[in-house]
Image (cartoon, rainbow, N blue to C red):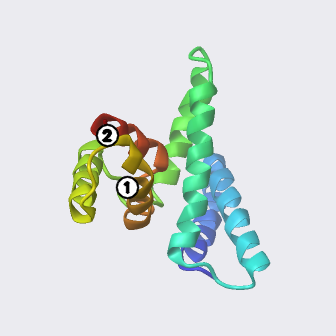
Amino acid sequence: MGELLTQLRKENMMAMKNHDTLKKGVLSLLISSIALAEKEGGKTLTKEEELAYVQKELKQTRETLAETPADRTDVLEETNKKIALLESYLPKQMSEDEIKAAIESILQEKGLDPIKKNQGPVMKEMMAKYKGQTDGKTVNKVLGTILK
């Protein structure tokens, strides 16, 4: 059993004892995704592999937030709490300035010009180097401001 999965299971027990239905719901979802992946793969997932499931859930929750009507404050509030909870399991996320600096560093290291043609290689390098610290959508957005 992976390190994160063990932690999630312990926290889920506490959430049940504390009658924290929001946390219990989020944790149960993560636990079942990660446990299923381990069962199907027949091996314990690495921390990075476990975090990929947290990121996937975070991405889906952010999409839900974007689709929620502004007048549904109850849903918006709950979704924001879920996002904060999911983010608490991920490494500190990079700011747009940090992403920009990392992209510029990659362009220099690889001797690439800041042109659209180089978007693929830069994107691939960013996602490999900073896995778990950012997401493709944010990197793509920052890349769009740098590449011509």
Q: Which residue is mark 1?
A: 122
94 relative position to 32: left or right: left
User: Picture quarter containing residue 142?
Assistant: top left
SS under mark 1: helix
Mark 1 surroundings: few (<14), some (14-19) or many (≥20) residues within 10 A: many
Residue pictured at 71% horizontal, 63% vertical: 33
Residue type at the position of mark 2:
Leu
Mark 2 and 1 residues: CB-CB less than 8 Å, in contact? Answer: yes
- In the image, residue 85 lies at what x, y percent? 51, 51
Which residue occupies the foreground of this view, 28 or 125?
Answer: 125
The residue positioned farthest toward the bottom in the image shown: 43
Residue type at the position of mark 1:
Val
Which residue occupies the foreground of this view, 106 or 15?
Answer: 106
SS under mark 2: loop
Label disc, if present, on residue 147 of the rendered structure = 2
137 relative position to 106: left or right: right
- In the image, residue 102 lies at what x, y percent? 26, 55
Look at the picture and state if 45 lies above or below 147: below
The residue positioned farthest toward the right in the image shown: 40
Mark 2 surroundings: few (<14), some (14-19) or many (≥20) residues within 10 A: few
